[in-house]
Amino acid sequence: MSADLDARPAESTRDDGLDPTSPLVTRRRAFGIFLVALAAVTLLFLLGEGGEATFVLRDITGGDPYFQMPDLVVSVGTVVLVVAILAAFAGGIQLARGFGRRTYLVLGLVLALFVFAFLTWATAGSSLNLLAILRLTIRQAVPLVFGALAGVLCERSGVMNIAIEAQFLTAAFTGALVGSVSSNAWVGLLAGAAGGAFIGWLLAVMAIKYRTDQIIVGVVLIVFATGLTSFLASQLLTPNPDLNTPAIVSPIGIPVLSRIPVLGPLFFNHTIFVYGAFAAVLLVHWALFKTKWGLRVRSVGEHPRAADTVGINVYRIRYQAVVLGGAVAGLGGAFFTLDSAAQFSEEMTAGLGFIALAAMIVGRWRPFGALGAALIFGFAGSLSGGLAIVQVPIPSEFLLMAPYLVTIVVVAGLVGRPRPPAADGVPYVKE
Amino acid sequence: MKMEMRGVTKRFPGVIANRDVDLVVEEGEILALIGENGAGKSTLMNVLYGLYDADEGEVLLDDQPRTFNGPGDAIAAGIGMVHQHFMLVPVFTVAENIVLGVEPTRGAGRLAVRRAEESVRELSDRHNLPVDPHAVIEDLPVGLQQRVEILKALYRDAELLIMDEPTAVLTPQETEELFTAMRALKDQGTSIIFITHKLGEALEVADRISVLRGGEIAGHTTPAETDQDQLAAMMVGREVDLVVDREPATPGEVVLAIRGLEVVNDRGQLAVKGVDLDLRAGEIVAIAGVQGNGQSEFVEALNGVAEVTGGSIELDGRELVGLHPKEILRAGVGQVQEDRYAEAMVAEFSVAENLVLNTWDAEPYARRGVLQSRTIDELARKEVEEFDIRTPSIHTDMGNLSGGNQQKVVVAREFARDLRVLVAAGPTRGIDVGSIEYIHERIVAFRDAGHAVLVVSTELDEVMALGDRVAVMHGGTLSGPYDAPVDRDAIGLLMAGIDPDRPVTASGSAEQPPQT
């Protein structure tokens, strides 16, 4: 989550404020205490489990690597001890003088180490396919990335989009239907984008033209999309299975790169959706922060009246951003039926639209931030499956709660209060 | 560029905002357009700027009739507006704000950031309005933000600048700088329409003055031919007394004693840094200061709604810090809040309900938890009569009243209670001259009845007119209070945080040490 450094000129770091009562200093201390506590938790709960943990890094996707990576075998006790010492050490430095601008980086690294220690402990005496878990992380992050980017586009223009779930469902449905009828995954993909764009357009009309409360519109759209797709699924798709067997996309291995051990299967042997998600992050970032259009989108999201007084058509820009956002969410929705499941089923998106919304918030309305958050959430989802296999005495539901916990922590302002666009959710009324 | 309006009339449902207005600005001339709030200045300028269509009449630029279908057209025709509430995106840089809408690009819609910054730097050099193109707007002081607004108009090749109450947010020194810039622009051929209700400023900087009253032109004049009293009479339509008549104060015992007060603002920063002040019965202490120097937090602390981190506030020896706002209210602290709409009234409630907004739950307005509407209505009728509140009925929604009448309701509500001290923050903000006059009289009368008054205002005129002692708040600390009469320029310097290097209390009385 440290990739979003370049978007704005210096998120001013008034960190070295000298006032000892300043909240920044209090927060610095709190982070230090957190790190030390993490070290203590590591020692108390994870130490004592003996034996070795085996992490499998072999390519089992049939990618024909240059050579097979050997398994990573580590001693549980050593890993736990080293991680605990590193966490305590970082905490000590943080308490003594603070890491300043690098605080979040250090915090992230230590948390990553802690997760590794936890994995080692959980795998003790058995083996875990780490490569598969990481690969699944990326695939699970795909719809979240598209959904969160949709949110970023809409909300940067000042229209709140809690209807990502509706865009997912509609796009999953249209993608499946059109993908089946045309027997072409690419046509299905376009149909998915169109389905998402349609919901985006509905949101835009209600929010921009009729100035309806955007939270209410969002909820209504979700109910509408759930009801409509469920109805059509049972009335149209179930009696006609031909309409629900879309052509699906297949992985495209990138020459040379896909044969690198570990990295190849992780990044370079995926479907178009995965590559598309990473490309979309770059594209949206470029569009929002490097182009004239992006400057205007951000201006109508921050201070629409100012944009209006210099002759920018606030309504038109908002329509563009919201409909485009809907289309991007539509790509995430099409992933469900054209890649991951190969058929539409009722409410198949299972609330992931809300997790995408959370990823947008945790990513602070920035494309790279959203990507980082989506990857973390994807990892939590993928890990919960992996841990169920090695039979950890922790219910997998706890890991599935991770996205919500992280969101609460971020929204509560514990790690720097997220700042939404100033006019987010506020309808614009021309004078 | 020469601009002429001929017979411009603008109607809104039920009101005529502008009637048959003729107005001329010659090339390279500063025209001051003065008028009270609600006189139709903003409507008229919005017609000129293409935000409204005129129902009758025409606008001529360089003797050519023009019609605008929106600000875009007006901008293209060379009209620039410096809005009273800055039209700047706070999180954007100076350069981004200036080029917004006419962005330089280099193919594929890419922003040419460096080119934008260079042209902004070149523009600010040419007009001698220095500003850093990289700076983020929200980090800049108000005076610089205004400079960005001016540059924004010049970047669009504005030949006619409309400046809507540009001095309202400035320190006296920043105002002087603005006037210098305006004169320089004028010399380069730019025409300026300077909208204000501060008569002294109109006289100082304008070549000609046009007065609007009730949507119509009340007269055209020049600074050489007129003076403040005459202008005020033109503006209001009758003789106005700009000076508040009053006897010298006869201060009694200390009522409110503030010691080492420290207050934290809602971002957790220390906004009031150790203020000491004694307020005595029968005197008005007026605190001047530019917006955002801790006055809001100071007043909020007196009302019990801010976080006090140190010091004490004693009312007749009773500690107020830590008390619930309602207890402070009941202890006899009267409050006129800074932001009427946000803090002092409920627009959707009736006038009568607003008059008991802080007493509704006590006898005689409520008995056993039931509102006594008859008692409330009686009080409302009495107050409406006494304070000359112009309202169709006591059951009219507060939001339908004019700003001046709303403020009268707020003041009436406070005076209806048994008060020991009145804390009035910006008591005449945004209201008409007639109401200002009236509210000032009531405040002085309240003082004469032996009560203590604390006035906090960003309007230097008001501070000078009301204060028996004048203090200045800057950066969270208080200078003074100094005994009136005080030297206006010295107060202005203190407001900007500069040591005036001369006695603040004006000549005639020996220099007195600041009282504690």
Image (cartoon, coloured by chain):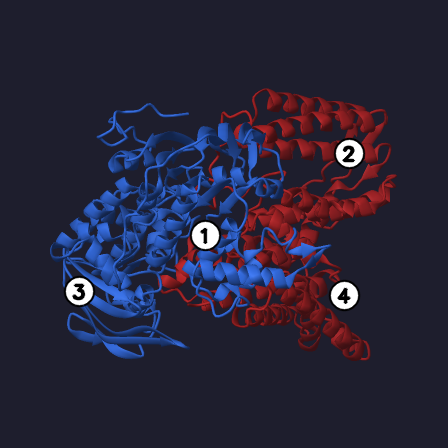
Q: CA distance from mark 3 to mark 2?
A: 82 Å
Question: In the image, which lettered chain appears blue?
Answer: B
- Residue at position x 73%, y 43% in the image: A131
Position of residue B258 in the picture relative to residue A165 (left or right): left
Please say if the residues under marks 1 and 3 sit with CB atoms less than 8 Å apart: no
Question: In the image, which lettered chain appears red?
Answer: A
Precedes in sequence: disc 1 or disc 4: 1
Residue wearing tag 4: A347
Q: Chain of mark 4?
A: A
Q: Chain of mark 1?
A: A
**Amino acid found under the numbered disc labelled 1:** Phe
Precedes in sequence: disc 2 or disc 4: 2
Which label was assigned to residue B220? 3
**Res. A256 in view:** no
Precedes in sequence: disc 1 or disc 2: 2
Residue wearing tag 1: A289
